[in-house]
Image (cartoon, rainbow, N blue to C red):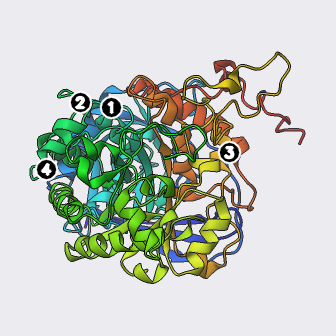
Amino acid sequence: MAYLEFKVISFLTFKMSGERTFTFTFTFFSFLPLLFLIFIPQTTTATTNYPINIWPKPTTFLWPSPKSILLSPTFTISHPNHRYLTPAVNRYRHVILTEHHHPIITPSINLTSPTPLLHLIISVSDVTSPLSHGVNESYTLSTPSNNSVTAYINAVTVWGAMRGLETFSQLVYGKNVAAGVYIYDSPIFMHRGVMLDTSRNFYEVDDLLRLIKAMSMNKLNVFHWHITDSHSFPIVFPSEPELAGKGAYGNEMMYSPVDVKKIVEFGLEYGVRVLPEIDMPAHTGSWAEAYPEIVTCANMFWWPAGGPALAAEPGTGQLNPLIPKTYEVAKNVIHDTIAMFPDSLFHAGADEINSACWNTDPSIQKFVASNGTLSQLLEKFINNTLPEILSLNRTVVYWEDVILSANVKANPSLFSPENVIMQTWNNGPSNIKKLVTSGYRVIVSSADYYYLDCGHGGFVGNDSRYDQPPGIDQGDGGSWCGPFKTWETIYNYDITYGLTDKEAQLVIGGEVALWSEQADSTVMDSRIWPRASAMAETLWSGNCDETGMKRYAEATDRLSEWRYRMVARGIGAEPIQPLWCLKNPGMCNTVHPFTS
């Protein structure tokens, strides 16, 4: 033990829109090579703005005397050997030594010592914890404030160490590192994700890898991959190769088992889980290319003249729960998916069951004529597939429609809250409340806040809504979920609004969603970033400052700066303001910060 450094470091309060409040004093004991942290409840706090910022903002960021230290060109990182941490360390060392990020406004920080920073020592107390739902992602980080040449990251798991490495990389600017920084960091919500639809339009493997890379930069940890839908079936399953062979857009628009393995492994190296979704029994028109006998209303015009729509949008088809072959194919798909994706969650879809589609089938017509209901039909499908997924040791995620739809829904008694998580996308806080009061864990993707495809108009052709005389109010421009969701709309959304503390504990996190009717690889980055960054911060450390006030005003410049850094790292994030605004802090606000 080389020496003992003892520091009592201020305090912090963080909260999520007034719902959850935590206040601590932090006492750091640095025993080389470990860093320990003691939490002491405290009641007062202060707000501080720093010349260097981290995105997402850490739960604790303490910099008593802002200074910097040079980064040695021979800078090294010591760490436990680990299959996924080791490549992460190599990656971050390269970024730290070569990025040379220059903030738009150069920080006015003096060097604390002519001695450069030589080492970063990473300590991990549990190197065996897998990347799984609920894994500990906390870490502490300290950089020296005196003549020491070593910085420290201490984490419970390697995944927390990865989060600490990202934070450390953002403390580096030019050839300098912020000196005398003390951080304790841990996310409020365990599930922080991006959902991407690869059925409506295809994305190359490299696009998905770039998405995962950007997610890791923003400390997001779940890539929810909506793989299949009525439009195409792009994934190759060994036991059902014809589903992709006939249902994909083409041979060059498929994900092979090798591709999937590459994506999953890449995610592990970046601390991002891959959650597969095979949507069924609706949204399965593409299955009909291989098995027309198990799909109802496949390839029909989506909205027959004078009749009800057969689907929420063009692209019809739903699995027929009365056909035994349906379950043979579905179970093969389930088994192959679980074999290819190691995550403990399996997303089984079950949204937007369309009554009219099922009613086109003669066998279903006969079932209904014998006093059967379409809800019973859905329950039959659930009873034949849910136990199969559970038997393979997976927790199942369903879209909320499966129990909340106004038309076709299953009895909630079929879904044990112990084994099932619900994902909500309709009616904002109202549906969240309904789900948590029923005892379900909830993933929030409220369309009014978290749908990134909204606001780009409709995609159907021959649409008379766009043939209106000048002067007619265009409303939301034909987008069903318009208007466009700005980063501030996303940032200010409180996913536990209106819930009791006990109910809020069932909200495990959220996901922004990019449905791909009007998106593909050419616009993926700009549609997702930096708006997903806004959600990333609110789910990591909240959207309020230490006084409980929303902090979107001060977040604006930080997010704009972060967007420029993401672009420099190869992510095509769209700008949120003119560059002039970042060069003139506060001048683009609706109220001047010094007169409000």
Dot placed on the residue nearer the N-terminal end, 3 or 1: 1
- Give the spatial CA distance, label 3 vs label 4: 42 Å
Look at the picture and state if 154 lies above or below 464: below
Residue at which label 1 appears? 202
For mark 4, what is the residue? 240
Q: Quadrant of the C terminus?
A: top right
The type of residue carrying mark 4 is Glu
- Cα separation, mark 3 vs mark 1, equals 28 Å
* Amino acid beneath label 3: Thr
| Mark found first going from the N terminus, 2 or 4 | 4
Q: Are marks 2 and 1 in contact (CB under 8 Å)?
A: yes
The reply to whether dot 2 and dot 4 touch (C-beta < 8 Å) is no
**Left or right: 123 as drawn, with respect to 590:** left
Q: Nearer the viewer, mark 3 or mark 1?
A: 1
- Which residue matches tag 2? 253
Q: Which mark is residue 489?
A: 3
145 vs 35, nearest the viewer = 35
Tag 3, which secondary structure? helix
**Mark 4 or mark 3, which is nearer the start of the sequence?**
4
User: Amino acid type of disc 1?
Assistant: Phe
Quarter holding the N terminus?
Answer: bottom left
Mark 2 vs 1, N-terminal side = 1
Q: Residue at horizontal 83%, vertical 24%?
A: 472
Image vertical order of residue 585 relative to residue 423, above or below: above
